[in-house]
Amino acid sequence: MNAPFRVGQGFDLHQWAQGRKLALGGVDIPHEVGLLGHSDADALTHAIIDALLGALCLGDIGKHFPDTDPRYKDCDSLALLRETVRLVGDAGWSVGNIDSTVVTEAPKLAPYIPMMRERLAEAMGIEVEAVSVKATRTERVLFEPEKGLLAMATALLVRRAI
Ligand code: MG
């Protein structure tokens, strides 16, 4: 497998829950409900982690950071992203760019997207111009938006020069 590039995709879905915070892309967003999960339930960061792991056939986030492990209880998912990028680097690859989409009816994410891009880029050690975060609404067609939020990501990896 000598191709200079690898591509991966990630998908994550979390339920809304009372009494939980909403963290997306490493940014805490004020909202009346948050997302349920063992970690901070940052679905966007989780989707990016799965895209990075998927690009190298390294399995998924549950394999590397199991939700049965107390170390990851309420943990900052950006720390998991940093660890994932370290794995990617150890395997001889660099993150080229990320594109991602969050699908939700509320809250409006546009004001938070610049900060999400900055936090994600910093965690991955890449330029903010290489990290795209988009938001779209469900139009109530694909799933019941009052039940949860979903995020998708694509990652391009570039083989490091030896
Ligand atoms: Mg998740």
Image (cartoon, rainbow, N blue to C red):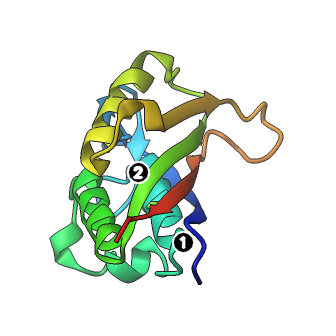
Residue 42 placed where, x, y %? 38, 49
* Of 72 and 53, the residue lying toward us: 53
Q: Are marks 2 and 1 in contact (CB under 8 Å)?
A: no
Q: Amino acid at mark 1?
A: Gly
* Residue 85 seen by the camera: yes
Q: Which mark is residue 45?
A: 2
Residue 93 placed where, x, y %? 40, 67
Residue at figure coordinates x 42%, y 72% from the top left: 61
Residue 136 placed where, x, y %? 66, 30
* Of 29 and 132, the residue lying toward us: 132
Q: 128 above or below 23?
A: above
* Of 16 and 47, the residue lying toward us: 47
Residue that numbered label 1 is attached to: 54
Element class at badge 1: helix
Real-space CA distance between mark 2 and mark 1, rounded to the nearest whole angstrom: 14 Å
Q: Quadrant of the N terminus?
A: bottom right
Q: Amino acid at mark 2?
A: Thr
Near mark 2 (Cα within 10 A), the count class, few <14, some 14-19 or many ≥20, is: many
Please identify the quarter of the rendering in which residue 161 is found: bottom left
Residue 79 placed where, x, y %? 22, 57
With 5 as the anchor, is 139 left or right in this view? right
Residue at figure coordinates x 51%, y 46% from the top left: 98
